[in-house]
Amino acid sequence: MPIKSYVVFPRTGEKNQLIKLLENTEHCDVLPSSNKEVLVLVTDTKNDQQEEALHQALDNINEIEHLNLVSGFSEKVSYDEQKKLS
Amino acid sequence: MMNRRNFLKKAAAASAMAAAATMIPGILFASDQVDDNITGDINWTKGPCRFCGVGCGVLIGTQKGKAVAVKGDPNSSVNKGLLCVKGYHQIMCTSSADRLTKPLVKKNGKYVETSMEEALDLVASKMKETIEKHGKDSVAMYTSGQSTIPEGYVASKFMKGAIGTNNLDCNARLCMASAVTGFLTTFGADEPMGCYEDIEYANVFVLWGNNMAEMHPVLFSRMLDNRLTRKNVKIIDLATRTTRTSKAADKSILFKPQADLAIANAICYEIINNGWVNNSFVEKHIVFNKGKTNIGYGLEDKFKFKDKATPIDFEQYKTFLEGYRPDKVEAITGVSAKDIKYLASLYGDPNLKVVSYWCMGLNQHTRGTWMNNLVYNIHLLTGKISQPGNGPFSLTGQPSACGTAREVGTFTHKLPKGVVTNKKHRELAAKIWKVPYDRIPDKPTYHATEMFRAVDRGDIKFIWTQVTNPLVSLPKTGRYRPAMQKDSCFVVVSDVFPTPTSDVADVILPAAWHVEKSGMYGNSERRTQYWDKMVEAPGEAMPDAWMTIEIAKRMGYGDLFPYSKENHHEEIYNEYRQFHVGKKHNMAPVEVLKKQSGVIWPYIEETGKSTQWRFNSKYDPACDSTKEFDFYGKPNGKAVIWQRPYEPAPEVPDNEYPFWLNTGRVIEHWHTGSMTRRIPVLHQAVPNAYVEFHPDDAKQMGIRNKQKVKVISRRGTTVLPASINERGMPTKGQVFVPFFDESMLINDVTLDAFCPISKEPDYKKCAVRIEKV
């Protein structure tokens, strides 16, 4: 079940509002930068349904300008599967 | 108490913070978020990172016999707890489903699993039989700057001391051989004189063709930190492509490919013309030489070249530089005279401390040795060398390119101390190895490119590769892949994962990964780093050093390899240390390495300290203490300023092939991608290679982002998606392709021209044309 981290770029001037929204979103931990308009978001879902629901919730947050996936810990993915992904 | 899931969340957060730091210079996160305070049943063991030449200290978390986590080692002075995205995720490759765990032997065109005993018997018998039939120079080993020090040492002893052939070379030939020949010709001693602590003292960093933000991200972060916290710190990016480094730099100067030779000479002209020469330093510590010119490019098989040093005086050197007045070189370089004068003023200002950094941009160059010499010229003219914050510093790409390839000497011409052509050096090796002196041949044989040409010609009939993937990393793989498939050569590949190289092997030997064995690496700043085995290797996978020893025993050389299976790494290192006894290259004892996060040689026994700045008698006890500086690598104690001209690249764009091709790396992937492409998060971040265009070129050709195009040279073709205004932007008339992707082999397209002195290929310049698919 995936634990993921993202670098999140808020829309201009919306950093604080975005922090509040993400803090109130289930499965999310927010780590704001103390000097730049950027956040780190860590998500922790238990199953595919939760993950899908979280994605939809994030998609609906207008204050997010850009979401950059950095890290994901989940089940093994074979190299052949990865090749297919690419 | 922290459970594993919470730990993974911490690791994920740390990765994202590290990624943010490389994207946004100077970004800070609240310290309570960075401090992880990990406790619980995870056992943490120190070691160096598996990947690049920076040599970050890592702590590997193990639990129930598995490596489960990685964090930066806060006690490592290299990275002070920070890691890049590759570093954080490194252990994830080990659980890849296609991990090699059993030996595979090709029978009737198909791979059949066998036992390790059987596979080793077969390899030894094939090697022995080949030597009996065709002579000892018909067998070869090709190893790596990622081999551990013990692995490199036993490979050298096996090939040169036991078998008696110099047919040993390594992939470090492809990345830093020009740095070696640059150091040897200028200083008579290899490896940088300074250390990473220079970053904390320097005012100016000049990056010569070096995208440090992606290739040496932790060092780049240290530079950015310094720029934030200290006044008067500048980063100058001098390159042929706009990169993340350019964007973070204070000034980005773009030049035409190959023109760095003219730029460096023009800087020297300006330094002299403006009276910025440190005359006292030059008079006491410098001599001037010129070498041969029009030295060729090594494009033909069996190419030979030997440089000849002719002494000149300062006046002759000044006259030579008249041809490199900044306004005269504008057309060749594409750099304005104003910018060259600005660069010279930074080097020339006695109140500024300057460090020059470079890596593949200068080394992978048909005049790579010359370019290294020329950067040294700048520092020698100004006396800005061997002092905290002042110095030229060639960075390495691989984690032990210095420790193993250069110091142990896994090149055809090298011995653990010195070179095969030197009688005294052969005598020392023979004594320590306990072999007859005349068994070690006195002439080098094949450097990397020539080794694979010899396979193609049928001269090499047995080759064993360890810890490397040449059929992705060699230039002009379109020639060398079919060469390795020929029946005339028996191919053995030791690796952790299947690769395009193992695809052509007759025998595949499964190798233990990094933390599944003990070992030592040596990083760019002469730092030797030790680690203990932390987890068991899967199946029958075995450390490469032990494979070599097992083969040696089977071939009748067991008495030369009396090491124990459990502790061979330490026994081998203790034997190897004997080569470097003395003040100039003393290596720290294993007991010291075990306690510390690396030690920089020469290790000073009396004080138990590293030598951070060589050739400066204030810091280096190997110097003649009556002199302030002593370049003791040269018999007269003087460094050499070399007169080296601009000469063009062997292949330049023309009507048929109108673009320069430049190749390189991305932060997410380690070299040929055999490890990082098996780490899901890194693979997903950059799943495939691409070809970068300047937007004007793309527009003119009607090429859109992601559109597939063919990159075609006189040697081969590959198809890649276009990348416009994304990660990097080449100058107009140039395209850039990263080489990590085995499914889009750009090295089928590159040219196998090399520096005639270092024999290092130039992956940065050849001519291509582009066609829409």
Image (spheres, coloured by chain):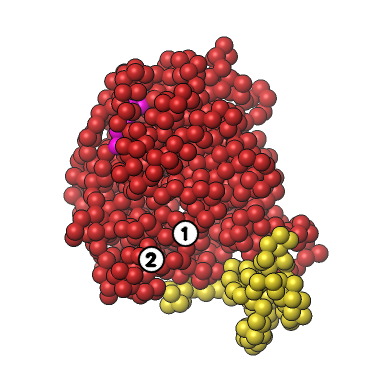
Q: Which residue is mark 2?
A: B695
**Dot 1: few (<14), some (14–19), or many (≥20) neighbours within 10 Å?**
some
Q: Which residue is mark 1?
A: B666
Q: Are marks 2 and 1 on the same chain?
A: yes
Q: Is residue B462 among the parts visible in the rendering?
A: no
Q: Residue B584: x and y, percent?
A: 52, 24
Is residue B286 found inside the magenta-colored segment of the image?
no
Chain that the image shows in red: B
Q: What amino acid is labelled 1 in the image?
A: Val
Q: Is residue B681 left or right of residue B168?
A: right
Q: Secondary structure at mark 1?
A: loop
Give the magenta range: B642-646
Q: Secondary structure at mark 2?
A: helix
Identity of the residue furthest to the top in this view: B626
Is residue B644 found inside the magenta-colored segment of the image?
yes
Residue at left 47%, top 38%? Answer: B343
Q: Is residue B448 above or below residue B21?
A: above
Tell me the quarter of the picture where residue A64 sits: bottom right
Main secondary structure type of the part rendered in magenta? loop
Q: Residue B428: x and y, percent?
A: 42, 24
State the CA–CA distance, disc 2 to disc 1: 20 Å
